[in-house]
Image (spheres, helix red, strand yellow):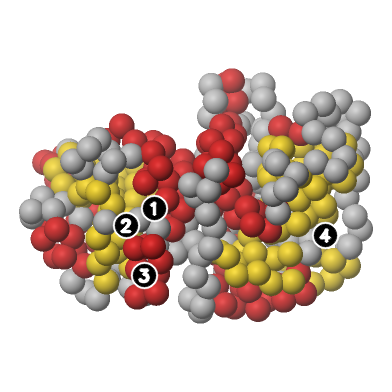
């Protein structure tokens, strides 16, 4: 089968032939990929940012946002069968450790992360597990929902955690309205009555944010912090969802929060430099976010299949994977880029 393989950090992947995976374990599931999302994390992987944390051996197949059709199942699989349309939770888990039992399955002690620490889904087929499979309506097109498997669940998970802080009368700033941010906006509108203020440096992204229900938009022109403070009576927002967190945006996000406010860090790429006295004197919080739970993805798919959350996508054939990566890196993708093997 064809697959997008990374052979060396700081060099582009190559598309080459590799053996098709097979279901060898009792809970193994092989999925025929119908859609594979292209994520900024893929760019960070190529840059070597994940090399130490993932411990993956090169070469391997990238791609961690996947949906498709069940091709083969192991002997003990009972929740899906061949031909089912599925979206895959990005981290197949054990179901037995404390984190899994507590419903925090993205912190499973025995999980793997296809596309990060093992072969992923930018290929014709992917090996996963029964615990990762969420069965979808057969009419669902995998290429329309694939990016919800990581970008979607990550944005939704952050919003879900912030919901108790976003009662009516509050303000939530969405810092960055790109591939994750545009899902975050829709999740906020579906789950809360907060006022949604969207900040982005791209006018087209702000236009999309308005179409998705943003109450206010702010162009990141160097005066975005002042603009947000002006919109909030000088106080700042109760919550800032930082979908950028690099190139200075992470510092802006903290500056946009009010006393006792919270900066949810979702994007990554740079360090946050905050004087500790500014944290304790105002009781502000910096909250990390990692993917999301299996149940988060189930809930998100309910919103998606009822039309409350939609993905704005640009589709590429598998053979054009390098074009998709280049377009994402250059900022030419509004929403998400999707490979369709």
CB atoms of marks 3 and 2 within 8 Å: no
Location of residue 87 in the rendering, given as x and y in whole percent from the top left corner: 68, 45
How many numbered circles are shown? 4
Residue drawn 46% across the image and 44% down it: 156
Residue drawn 91% across the image and 58% down it: 19
Q: CA distance from mark 1 to mark 2?
A: 7 Å
Q: Nearer the viewer, mark 4 or mark 2?
A: 2
CB atoms of marks 1 and 2 within 8 Å: yes
From where the camera sits, is residue 12 visible?
Answer: no
Location of residue 138 in the rendering, given as x and y in whole percent from the top left corner: 75, 44
* N-term-proximal mark, 4 vs 2: 4
Q: CA distance from mark 1 to mark 3?
A: 13 Å
Location of residue 287 in the rendering, given as x and y in whole percent from the top left corner: 35, 42
In front: 222, or 171? 171
* N-term-proximal mark, 1 vs 3: 1
Q: CA distance from mark 4 to mark 1?
A: 32 Å
Q: Is residue 148 left or right of residue 318?
A: left
Residue 328 position (above or below residue 257): below
* N-term-proximal mark, 3 vs 2: 3
Q: Is residue 158 left or right of residue 286?
A: right
- Say the numbered circle drawn on residue 185: 1
Query: Considering the numbered disc 2 on the image, is that residue within a helix, a strand or a loop?
Result: loop
In front: 51, or 331? 331
Q: CA distance from mark 3 to mark 2?
A: 9 Å
Residue drawn 87% across the image and 29% down it: 26
Query: Considering the numbered disc 3 on the image, is that residue within a helix, a strand or a loop?
Result: helix
Q: Residues within 10 Å of mark 4 (few under 14, many from 20)?
A: many
Q: Quadrant of the N terminus?
A: bottom right
- Kindly identify which residue carries mark 4: 124
- Kindly identify which residue carries mark 3: 207
């Amino acid at each position: 089968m064809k697959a997008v393989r990374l052979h060396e950090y700081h060099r582009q992947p190559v598309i080459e032939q590799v053996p098709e995976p097979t279901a060898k374990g009792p809970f193994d599931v092989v999925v025929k990929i119908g859609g594979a999302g292209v994520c900024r994390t893929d760019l960070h992987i190529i840059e070597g940012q994940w090399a130490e944390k993932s411990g993956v051996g090169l070469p391997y197949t990238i791609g961690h946002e996947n949906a498709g059709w069940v091709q083969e199942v192991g002997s003990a699989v009972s929740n899906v069968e061949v031909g089912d349309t599925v979206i895959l939770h990005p981290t197949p888990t054990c179901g037995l450790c404390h984190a899994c039992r507590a419903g925090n399955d993205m912190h499973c002690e025995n999980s793997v992360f296809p596309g990060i620490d093992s072969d992923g889904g930018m290929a014709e087929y992917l090996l996963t597990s029964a615990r990762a499979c969420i069965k979808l309506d057969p009419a669902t097109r995998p290429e329309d929902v694939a990016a919800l498997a990581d970008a979607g669940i990550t944005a939704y998970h952050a919003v879900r955690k912030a919901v108790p802080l976003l009662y009516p009368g509050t303000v939530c700033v969405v810092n960055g309205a790109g591939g994750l941010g545009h899902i975050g906006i829709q999740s906020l509108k579906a789950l809360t009555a907060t006022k949604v203020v969207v900040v982005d440096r791209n006018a087209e992204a702000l236009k999309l944010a308005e179409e998705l229900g943003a109450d206010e938009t702010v162009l990141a022109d160097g005066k975005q912090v002042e603009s947000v403070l002006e919109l909030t009576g000088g106080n700042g927002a109760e919550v800032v969802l930082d979908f950028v967190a690099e190139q200075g945006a992470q510092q802006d996000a903290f500056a946009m929060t009010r006393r006792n406010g919270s900066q949810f860090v979702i994007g990554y790429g740079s360090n946050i430099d905050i004087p500790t006295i500014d944290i304790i004197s105002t009781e502000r919080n910096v909250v990390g976010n990692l993917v999301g739970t299996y149940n988060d993805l189930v809930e998100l798919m309910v919103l998606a299949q009822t039309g409350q959350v939609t993905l704005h996508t640009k589709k590429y054939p598998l053979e054009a994977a390098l074009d998709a990566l280049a377009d994402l890196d250059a900022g030419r993708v509004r929403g998400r880029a999707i490979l369709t093997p």
